Amino acid sequence: MLALRLPGGTMGMPGPMAFPLLLGLSLLALSILLYAQSRPSPQFRYSHIFPKGEVLKVLFVLGAFFLSLLVFERIGFVISTFALLALLFRGIGGKTMVRSILYGLIISLAAYLSFYYLLAVRLPKGVLNF
């Protein structure tokens, strides 16, 4: 709905509102179509969506993302993303501590460098001033 705040333009010369609005309407139509086609059968029970052990994993992931959201501005992108990924690799992925730390470090630094140099996006520096 934020696309409606952009200038509309004309039919011959569409403005910045045209693409986000058409994309949003297309996604809405496809979502409604997908929902209409995917009604569960009468035998379907919602208790089978998450097996018993999986509920704790879902809560772990939600908690890790929430914690990362809380500290993102204070400690910066690199540290918060590294900590989030290392936690997820260790807790959900079942990786060893060394691999979790290594994968988290590689991915967070690659993401930071991509955002900083390729996309010219300034991310929160936090305590590292990095």
Image (tube, rainbow, N blue to C red):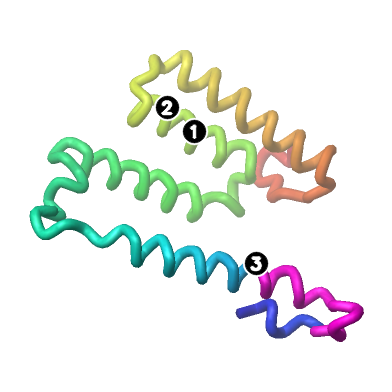
Q: In this rendering, which labeled residue sits more in front, label 1 or label 3?
A: 3
Q: Identify which residue, 120 or 31, lies in the foreground.
A: 31
Residue picked out by circle 2: 89
Label 3 SS? helix
Amino acid on which disc 1 is placed: Leu
Residue picked out by circle 1: 85
Label 1 SS? helix
Task: Measuring from the top left, give residue 20's x and y in whole percent.
Answer: 70, 70
Quadrant showing the N terminus = bottom right
Name the residue: 34% across, 66% down.
36
Task: Measuring from the top left, give residue 116's x and y in whole percent.
Answer: 79, 41
Name the residue: 11% across, 59% down.
42
Q: Identify which residue, 52 or 122, lies in the foreground.
A: 52
Taking 41 as reference, is 23 left or right? Answer: right
Residue picked out by circle 3: 23
Disc 3 packing (10 Å; few <14; some 14–19; many ≥20): few
Residue 122 painted magenta? no
Taking 129 as reference, is 2 left or right? Answer: left
